[in-house]
């Protein structure tokens, strides 16, 4: 591969990687094309024949491993050299040969990537011998990625075990994902259907119906004519449902294909002959009940037949229900909508197909999938299945998807260094929404006082507690809050009156009916808490797990926020004295000048220099000098007002910014206070040092309106003060 210009394709959804790889390869004279996902890469390959392909594993619109298999299936690219370039190479064992790749590289620093890429191109390293290079530049972000990948695998496990075929399509109608059931319905391999148009899976006769459904996003199951019209897919009948999905502002379409072949065959058997009907009827896995209308208006229905599965699903005996009214056997039929389905099908003559929930005292206890139609003889046939487990799986899938989306959004805010208040509000809203709670709170632990300070709070709590806009602080929290903070464990309680850890709600506070909270921990240190309360119904373990996940994100946000504050403080403050340094000083002086101009006043600059300080360092060492500087800074700071500023400019030089100057004596008074504060000797170990200072004063705007010029003129005035033998001050204008 070395010694000549190569055609190279780079596939990665991260624009920085695309730019980096393009720069590296183009500088070496290679022809480079890029693609941001698997589907885009296949479009490029229609017009571009590369010698080498670099691709990531985790990408939208066809992942890297699947793309690799698809490319290997194309005869024209059978011998193209494929390199996996992914962060996962450093996290997991990747079998290059199994997915059709020639080599694997872990994403690391730009320099490492450049070296390894050039080794591959120049054939310095043999195939399948690249050592994994773990990127240790940002382990915290890798932890977030690992958590998100774990959630993704959990999601894929659920989808891969669904009894329905699930296809994910882009807006053009091309397939970018198919679960195992969907692949089995197509009777082919996965790589043969990815990137193909969904409608092309069907016969020419069926494509018009599928295309119409795809455009309108309507369910196939309601018949367009008098008879139920299924869609045929490789000799199987399927019912299609379409669902729009929006993730990170990217819109895709889920096509859910339910194999209804057995149902179709059952219907044909029922209509073919009574004998075959009875044989099938009694051995169907689906429940079947046959009704006749009690009167000509179809106001009630009487059960005239039932199969074995119906009795098993509904826990009823056939001989005890024949001849009885619908509502006598199923009191929930009206509330669930079953009665309405039968009534509509009776009057319209059109089939009805719908999932219905069964409730007991307002709580959902099960789900049934009904298909109801009217026979030519007038009887009503109800075919149904117990889909409670499936509905629970779908609910869990939707719940996991919502959690993943919330985690992704919060993680993005943390990485983007959004404010802690904004992140707290986001986490509180998501915790409240996903646990269906009325109240929510995110609190930060004050490391000095131990108090719980609310960084985000539902408005209805503030309103009922009459907090208005005041900061909400819980001093030494008690009860369940106190237990969580003390034990550093999450909990949920659905009956506070039966829990000894609870205590009565003080007057004026929100009454709590049920409660859930999780601590936010950094290692073993408690940093905060996320709590929700007053849900309609009981909290469950999955609710606590959800809030604990959000609490972990909050702890990461707090840790990052504290680190950024610490870095900012170090950058703008003198490490020895704690005073602001020369980098922050211009900003503070600019603020003083703006305020002086706005209020028609003046500002003063006092340049303070220690006389003969070098002798202390030379004769007694830098430790003695540092001790003197710290004491001098402490005394100077004690002489000025809280609104004024003192900065250490370096060495033995300090600058004082005086606000609200109305007369010349104002800065003179401050200078005299500084001189007086430094009269007493400074003691270090067994030595006493008498400190003399010289102070130069410049006035804004009298002496100048420029920051550098004001500082320079105060410095000149200070040198004039030095010539008077020290312990004196001079104005620049004098």
Image (cartoon, helix red, strand yellow):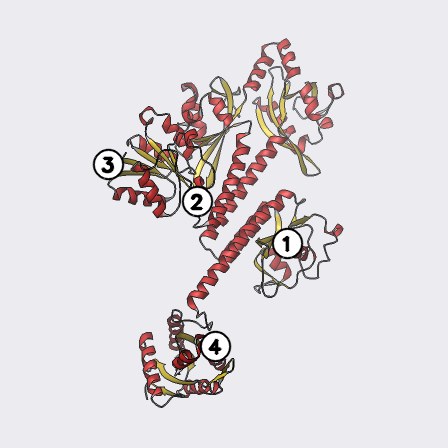
> Is 198 located above or below residue 20 in the figure?
above
**Any mark on residue 3, and which?**
3
Q: CA distance from mark 4 to mark 2?
A: 46 Å
- Whichever of labels 3 and 1 marks the residue nearer the N terminus, that label is 3
Q: Is residue 455 above or below residue 365?
A: below
Q: Which residue is mark 2?
A: 134
- In space, the residues marked 3 and 1 are separated at their CA atoms by 62 Å
What crowding class fits label 4: few (fewer than 14 Cα within 10 Å), some (14-19), or many (20 or more)? some
Residue at image mark 1? 488
Q: Position of residue 623 (x, y in %)?
A: 46, 75
Depth-wise, is mark 4 or mark 1 nearer the camera?
4
Q: Residue at x 57, y 47 (%)?
A: 549
Residue 40 seen in this snapshot: yes
**Mark positioned earlier in the residue sequence (3 or 2):** 3
Q: Secondary structure at mark 4?
A: helix
Mark 2: secondary structure? loop
Do the numbered discs 3 and 1 sit on residues whose CB atoms are within 8 Å?
A: no
- Residue 601, can we see it? no
Lower sequence index among marks 4 and 2? 2
Mark 4 lies on residue = 627
Q: Secondary structure at mark 3?
A: loop
N-terminal label among 4 and 3: 3
């Amino acid at each position: 591969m070395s010694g000549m210009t190569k055609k190279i394709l780079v596939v990665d959804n991260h624009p920085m990687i695309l730019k980096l790889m393009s720069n590296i390869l183009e500088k070496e004279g290679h022809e480079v094309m890029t693609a941001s996902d698997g589907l885009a890469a296949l479009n490029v390959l229609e017009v571009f024949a590369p010698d080498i392909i670099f691709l990531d594993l985790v990408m939208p619109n066809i992942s890297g491993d699947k793309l690799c298999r698809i490319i290997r299936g194309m005869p024209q690219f059978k011998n193209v050299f494929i390199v996996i370039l992914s962060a996962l190479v450093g996290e997991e064992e990747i079998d290059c040969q199994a997915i059709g790749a020639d080599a694997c590289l872990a994403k690391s620093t730009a320099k490492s990537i450049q070296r390894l890429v050039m080794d591959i191109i120049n054939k310095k390293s043999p195939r399948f011998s690249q050592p994994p290079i773990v990127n240790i530049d940002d382990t915290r972000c890798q932890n977030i990625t690992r958590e998100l990948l774990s959630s993704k695998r959990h999601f894929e496990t659920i989808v891969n075990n669904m009894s329905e075929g699930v296809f994910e399509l882009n807006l053009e109608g091309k397939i970018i994902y198919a679960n195992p059931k969907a692949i089995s319905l197509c009777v082919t391999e996965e790589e043969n259907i990815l990137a193909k148009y969904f409608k092309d899976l069907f016969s020419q006769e069926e494509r018009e119906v599928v295309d119409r459904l795809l455009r309108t996003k309507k369910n196939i199951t309601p018949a367009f004519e008098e008879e139920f019209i299924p869609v045929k897919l490789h000799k199987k009948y399927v019912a299609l449902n379409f669902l729009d999905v929006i993730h990170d502002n990217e819109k895709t379409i889920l096509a859910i294909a339910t194999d209804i072949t057995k149902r179709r065959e059952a219907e044909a058997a029922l209509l073919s002959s009574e004998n075959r009907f009875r044989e099938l009827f009694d051995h169907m896995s689906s429940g079947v009940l046959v009704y006749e209308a009690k009167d000509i208006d179809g106001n009630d229905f009487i059960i005239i037949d039932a199969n074995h599965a119906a009795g098993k699903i509904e826990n009823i005996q056939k001989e005890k229900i024949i001849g009885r009214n619908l509502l006598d056997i199923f009191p929930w039929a009206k509330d669930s909508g079953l009665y309405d389905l039968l009534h509509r099908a009776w009057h319209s003559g059109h089939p009805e197909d719908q999932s219905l929930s069964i409730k007991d005292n307002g709580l959902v206890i099960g789900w049934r999938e009904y298909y109801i139609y009217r026979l030519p003889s007038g009887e009503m046939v109800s075919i149904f299945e117990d889909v409670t487990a499936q509905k629970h799986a779908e609910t869990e899938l939707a719940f996991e998807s919502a959690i993943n989306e919330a985690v992704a959004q919060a993680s993005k805010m943390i990485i983007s260094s959004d404010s802690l208040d904004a992140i707290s509000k986001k986490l509180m809203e998501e915790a409240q929404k996903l646990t269906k709670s009325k109240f929510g709170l995110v609190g930060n632990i004050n490391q000095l006082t131990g108090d719980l300070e609310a960084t985000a709070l539902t408005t209805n709590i503030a309103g009922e507690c009459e907090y208005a806009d005041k900061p909400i602080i819980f001093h030494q929290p008690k009860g369940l809050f106190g237990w969580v903070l003390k034990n550093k464990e999450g909990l949920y309680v659905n009956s506070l009156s039966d829990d000894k850890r609870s205590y009565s709600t003080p007057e004026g506070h929100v009454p709590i009916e049920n409660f859930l909270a999780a601590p936010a921990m950094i290692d073993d240190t408690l940093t905060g808490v996320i709590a929700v309360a007053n849900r309609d119904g009981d909290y469950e373990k999955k609710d606590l797990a959800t809030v604990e996940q959000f609490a972990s994100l909050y702890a990461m946000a707090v840790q990052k926020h504290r680190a950024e504050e610490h870095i900012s403080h170090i950058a703008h403050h003198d490490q020895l004295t704690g005073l602001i340094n020369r980098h922050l000083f211009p900003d503070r002086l600019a603020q003083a000048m703006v305020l002086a101009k706005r209020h028609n006043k003046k500002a003063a600059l006092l340049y303070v220099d220690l006389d003969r300080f070098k002798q202390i360092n030379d004769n007694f060492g830098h430790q003695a000098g540092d001790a003197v500087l710290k004491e001098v800074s402490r005394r100077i700071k004690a002489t000025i007002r809280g609104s004024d500023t003192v900065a250490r400019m370096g060495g033995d030089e300090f600058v004082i910014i005086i606000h609200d100057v109305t007369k010349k004596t104002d800065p003179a008074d401050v200078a005299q206070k500084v001189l007086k504060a430094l009269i007493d000797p400074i003691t270090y170990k067994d030595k006493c040092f008498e400190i003399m200072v010289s102070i130069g004063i410049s006035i804004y705007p009298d002496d100048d309106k420029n920051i550098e010029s004001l500082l320079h003129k105060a410095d000149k005035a200070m040198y004039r003060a030095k010539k008077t033998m020290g312990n004196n001050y001079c104005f620049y204008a004098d």
